[in-house]
Amino acid sequence: MHDARKVSTLTEDEAQAELARLADILLRADTAYHGEDAPQMSDADYDRLKSRNSEVEARFPHLKRADSPSETVGALPSERFGKVPHAKRMMSLSNAFETTDIVEFDQRVRKYLGVPPDSPLLYTAEPKIDGLSLSLRYEDGVLVQAATRGDGAVGENVTANAKVIKDIPQRLKAAPDILEVRGEVYMNHADFTALNARQSEAGAKTFANPRNAAAGSLRQLDAEVTRSRPLKFFAYAWGEVSAPLADTQFGAITKLESLGFSTNPLTALCNGPDDLMAHYAKIEQQRAGLGYDIDGVVYKVDDLDLQRRLGYRSTTPRWAIAHKFPAELAWTRLEAIEINVGRTGALSPVARLAPVTVGGVVVSNATLHNEDYIAGRGGDGDPIRGGKDIRVGDWVQVYRAGDVIPKIADVDPSKRPDDAEPFDFPRICPECGSDAIREEGDAVRRCSGGLVCPAQAVEKLKHFVSRAAFDIEGLGTKQVEMFYADDQLPVQTPADIFTLEARDKANLTKLSNREGWGEVSARNLFAAIDQRRTVPLARLIFALGIRHVGEVAARDLARHFGSWQALVDAADAAAPAAVCQLEADAAETEERQLAVDEGRRARIKPVRDAVWAGVDGPAIAAWRDLIGIDGIGSTVAISLVTSFQQKAERESIDRLVAELTIQDAAAPATGGSPVAGKTVVFTGTLEKMTRAEAKARAEALGAKVSGSVSARTDILVAGPGAGSKASKAAELGVKTMDEDAWLAMIGGA
């Protein structure tokens, strides 16, 4: 068993570094896989990396990156093909690797739906084909359009190519007027071998694997080339339909088969995790003899009405999961250990390896997490790998799977060179020469240079211009690095971006005259910057790169405050309370330690009261309003408020804001909702819907859902078991109602 750190044991800095590495490797993999039909890794390894990313984000939502792999599906369509917007988004699947993951999936589904553990709940289980996703659109029974997945929202138009694939019907009988059939284009092993033999004889390109061959064959500009390739198609899903295919997933697949589509014969109905695991084992045993590649088994809630209730996350359905097959191990030589400095200043060690193939992918780098991991110590100080440290020159075992990026799983000391020395982790930042400090209780060493450290400053600018932030076309990673190091036209703060054109006009050497630039490219860049002078509030908040304030927190803050000025005013008003919160936390920690040392009970309340005694009412009210926002706790609030109160940071933000027009957060289209603009708190047990459904519905009607009762609360919905929140609501005179009254108010049944 490999010595991987579980997500539950990661520190915040380790998680930050983990997400950065995952984003980098998955972006490169997406480009290679979807854009170039030349995958760098197997589908199983890719999906597992993506699963690891999602798991880290779930535990540390405030660290979610702008370029998070969890917010992407596939890759942007190639410019070689026409673009086709999907009528219904093509989603990806979340992944599972262990039996416990399947049990937890079933538990999540039941909890969301309110289905008791002992009640039947049927799922379909089907092999996950390792091919290329394709959506076929039929109108009045005629195939009119075929599109690849693309980025999930827009795909590539491959209609002419799809029409020459024998497995794809050109006309359907007794089909709905509009029917989008979705499935996988693939190539079986025998056909793949024969194709490569023909390619080799002709002196043409051969393919690395059947998936690569299938993708390359479908994405041909000449449909006759596609016709010559032995492509097949399995149907397993649907997009837009004018009439339901059936009431269940299994019934719908049966209907697709009756219409003339090939469906997988190993698809089966299962009742609960035990049945699912049994069918998984059956498929895994047959895997080698199937004649085509699969990389796991997909489980879907069978009842389509329940699927609709469960709905979707940003890119994946709640009602489905892909159970992936295991990954592999390999041994190789560790040639060097290098230190990367991240946006937060964290020093992250990376192993440079003699290239080795692991699971069909060449690996030359692996994460080493931190200095303790290299030394053979875990986060709790206990030995890992039997206490064996890692040294340059070592023979190491590399592990690749979805719960980790490539990493060192083990070391063979018997093959260690005689001159191998223990690795001396640097105490000085390799980027700027500042002290690299490791705080007590922190597993990560961090550069103290701040903005003087090029690694941090550049990364903050990259974050600012990234897709989920300002998304400035033509100002990507390469350009940010160039402008940051430019002596004549430097960009070292976000505000500098929006003064770039004016400063360029004042320079004798124009940007358009520099290598790599011209009149058109410079003009396009300035125009792209101007287009981003008007920015939605949530994007601006996220783009600032405030620690702990990710996309979700930024949206929550924007939705709650509505305008930039309201947010700033609230942060300023809450500042004295935020300082006291920090002081109270520190005082409580000290009191607890003293109490343990002295063998007595900690006196927390007197300590807390003493710290808060000097804070005025308005500051406390502003603070409580801020931390009462659903999804915003004291950690995020403190980070936001203290960032705004730092002199240099505030000046930088003010300079930026002076260049922008900030759009207020748009209120939801509530259509005369009786709860629009009201603050609602749910407490106790809800019996007609789950808490997640109640919150989603309230927000869709324009209400603000808070986690705590205050003087600003308008409605408390109290189910059985309501406790202190109900008492506080009564004290404050907050309107309280039961679930039936709430549903009646909002028009529910």
Image (cartoon, grey):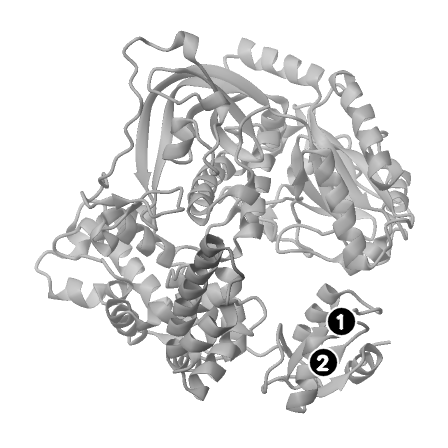
Query: x, y percentage for residue 353?
Result: 39, 21
Q: Is residue 26 left or right of residue 505?
A: right
Looking at the image, residue 80 lies above or below residue 541: above
Q: Residues within 10 Å of mark 2 (few under 14, many from 20)?
A: many
Amino acid type assigned to the residue bearing label 1 in the image: Gly
Judged from the image, the secondary structure of the residue bearing numbered disc 2 is helix
Give the mark nearer the N terminus: 2 vs 1: 1
Q: Residue furthest left?
A: 508
| Quarter of the picture holding the C terminus | bottom right
Cβ–Cβ under 8 Å for marks 2 and 1: yes
Give the spatial CA distance, label 2 vs label 1: 9 Å
Q: Which residue, given by chain and number where applicable, does mark 1 sit on?
A: 684
Q: Which residue, given by chain and number where applicable, does mark 2 sit on?
A: 726
Q: Quadrant of residue 637?
A: bottom left
Res 179 seen here: no
Q: Residue at x 62, y 72 (%)?
A: 707
Query: x, y percentage for residue 706?
Result: 61, 75
